[in-house]
Amino acid sequence: VQLQASGGGLVPAGGSLRLSCSASRRTFSVYVMGWFRQAPGKEREFVAVNRWGGAAPQYADSVRGRFTISRDNAKTTMYLQMNSLKFEDTAVYYCAAKERGSSEWKYWGQGTQVTVSS
């Protein structure tokens, strides 16, 4: 399973970025996919997940209302639209995949750096 995250960069506080995570067609159709982030000196934390079966996406409290997770099945790409960015959103963002019904995020992309200037 290969995941390729992209779209990070430097943005001023209040700005927006859209991250992308591309995957193979099989990965996209079989696995649950989500976003995580790791800030300097902190543990990796959950950001958002696309759920199966038409269930609404789930978000961390810290990003709910500002971030939107979505997917384009034709392009086998998952997105994270990040609006109203804050300094504390600065982190390396990772896309990840897990098997349906599993709690283990087994597959990880290489990460993309998001830096929000205050």
Image (tube, rainbow, N blue to C red):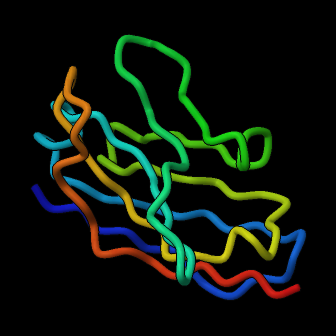
Residue found at x 55% / y 49%: 47
Image position of 109 (left or right of 86): left
**Residue 110, horizontal then vertical, whole percent:** 29, 75
* Number of numbered markers: 0
Q: Residue 28: name its quadrant.
A: top left
Q: Is 117 placed left or right of 19 in the picture?
A: right
User: Looking at the figure, which quarter contains the C terminus?
Assistant: bottom right
Which is more toward the observer, 118 or 42? 42
Does 112 appear above or below 68?
Answer: below
Does 107 appear above or below 33?
below
| Residue appearing at x 49%, y 76% in the figure | 92
Indicate the quadrant containing the N terminus: top left, top right, bottom left or bottom right: bottom left
Q: Is residue 66 above or below residue 14?
A: above
Which x, y percent locates residue 90? 66, 76
Residue 61 screen position, x and y as percent: 70, 40
Q: Nearer the viewer, residue 83 or 88?
A: 88
Percent position (x, y) of residue 15?
A: 84, 71
- Which residue is at 17% across, 49% downward? 106
The image quadrant of residue 20 is bottom left
Indicate the quadrant where residue 23 lies: bottom left
